[in-house]
Amino acid sequence: GCFVKINDVEYAAANSYCDSMIVTHGSNPVTYNGKSFSVPKVNVFDVCGAGDTFLAALTYGYLSYGTIEKAIPFAIKAASITVQNLGVYAPTLKEINET
């Protein structure tokens, strides 16, 4: 009844895996349960906070949309906005929805 979100470095070091694992791969597609979710090409200035933004937006998206398959693209959009800014940047809901 839960999801595990890790990045590609953590995935490579893992000794075991679960079915509900969401793996972020930087600028490459996010993978979940055999599915790939594309990541838009953006100008990256700073990756600080990108993982936290992804996870927060994933949670919000899941609670709002009711499915993880709809929450992942929402989280990708949020993280894509964050990396286009210097320092830790929290995108607004308006920014995410306009992307």
Image: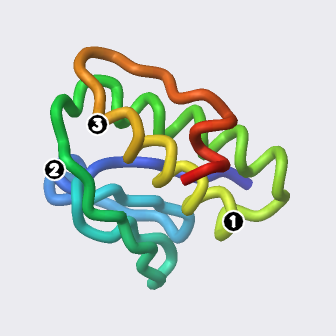
**What secondary structure is marked by label 3?**
loop
Q: Do the residues labelled 2 and 3 touch (CB within 8 Å)?
A: no
Alpha carbon distance from label 3 to label 1: 23 Å
Q: Residue 70 carries which label?
A: 1
Q: Nearer the viewer, mark 2 or mark 1?
A: 1
Q: In the image, what residue occupies the spot 45% across and 48% down? A: 5
- Residue 31 in view (yes/no): yes
Vertical side of 11 occupied by 97: above or below: above
Alpha carbon distance from label 2 to label 1: 24 Å
On the image, numbered disc 2 is attached to which residue?
9
Quadrant of the rendered structure where residue 66 is?
bottom right
Q: Which mark is residue 54?
A: none
Q: Of the residues shown, which amino acid type is indicated by label 3?
A: Gln
Image x and y of residue 21, in percent? 47, 61
Q: Of the residues shown, which amino acid type is indicated by label 2?
A: Val
Q: Which of 42 and 67 is in front in this view?
A: 42
Category of crowding for the residue at label 1, using alpha-carbon neighbours closer than 10 angstroms: few (below 14), some (14–19), many (at least 20): some
On the image, numbered disc 3 is attached to which residue?
84
Image x and y of residue 20, in percent? 56, 64
Image x and y of residue 88, in percent? 34, 16
